[in-house]
């Protein structure tokens, strides 16, 4: 069972460029160009938005289907079960999910830059409600990279993007959306 371990930080616009510079200075390998994503969170039998979710992510002509089960500890370093698979036909999967009683509950868009540094993955995310950085890897790597990038004093964000979408998004019918 794959476990995702990550820490998320809320960024101000003034911190973004210095963070990109630090990534480059630290020898991070990155794509440099943000990828646009649409994320759909489903609700239905056996799901609890605070703990268990299904997500269909579309980006760059690809689609990835994910099951996440959150550990509800209060730690700023989050651990959660994460099972993912690439999907060749996102529209067909969405149709199957709806036929089984699952419905879109949340939709959020983001632009994501992905970097690798010191054995960890660092992402810079822009969503309609803010800027964020995430470091994913073993906990000791997260803390090392946090210091390396000067994020050890940054505000940790405990809420996942679906929860932030509920807070800051717009309700359209039965779906909360946060779109550019």
Image (tube, rainbow, N blue to C red):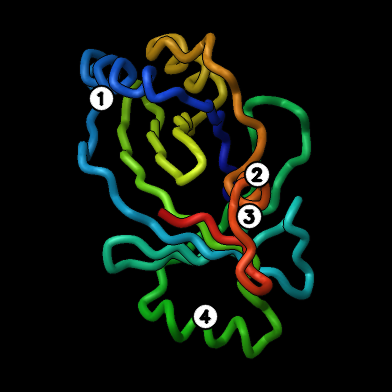
Q: Residue at x 62, y 44 (%)?
A: 164
Numbered label attached to residue 28: 1
Residue placed most toward the observer, 164 or 67: 164
The picture places residue 112, in percent across and down from the top left corner, at 35, 44
Q: Position of residue 5 (x, y in %)?
A: 57, 35
Q: Earlier in the sequence, mark 4 or mark 2?
A: 2
For label 2, count other residues whose C-alpha is less than 10 Å away and answer few (under 14), some (14-19) or many (20+): some
Kindly identify which residue carries mark 3.
68
Q: From the image, state whether disc 4 or disc 3 is nearer to you.
A: 4
Residue marked by disc 4? 94
Q: Which one is earlier in the sequence, the residue at label 1 or at label 4?
A: 1
The residue beneath circle 2 is 80
Residue neighbourhood size for the residue with mark 3, other residues' Cα within 10 Å, grouped as few (<14), some (14–19), many (≥20): some
Q: CA distance from mark 4 to mark 3?
A: 17 Å
Work out how far the residue at label 2 is from the one at label 1, CA to CA, in angstroms: 25 Å
| Relative horizontal placement of residue 16, taking residue 164 as reference (left or right) | left
């Amino acid at each position: 069972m794959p476990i995702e371990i990550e820490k998320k930080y809320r960024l101000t616009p003034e911190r973004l460029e210095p963070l990109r510079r630090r990534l480059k200075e630290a020898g991070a390998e990155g794509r440099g160009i943000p990828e646009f994503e649409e994320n759909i969170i489903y609700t239905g039998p056996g799901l609890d938005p605070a703990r268990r979710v299904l997500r269909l992510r579309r980006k760059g002509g690809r689609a990835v289907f994910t099951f996440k089960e959150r550990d509800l500890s209060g730690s700023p370093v989050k651990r959660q079960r994460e099972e993912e698979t690439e999907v060749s036909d996102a529209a067909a999967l969405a149709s199957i999910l709806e036929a089984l009683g699952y419905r879109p509950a949340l939709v959020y868009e983001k632009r994501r830059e992905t970097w690798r540094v010191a054995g960890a993955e660092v992402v810079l995310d822009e969503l309609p409600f803010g800027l964020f950085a995430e470091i994913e890897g073993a906990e000791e790597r997260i803390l090392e990279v946090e210091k390396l990038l000067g994020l050890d004093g940054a505000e940790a964000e405990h809420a996942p993007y679906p929860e932030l979408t509920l807070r800051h998004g717009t309700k359209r019918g039965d779906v909360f959306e946060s779109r550019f």
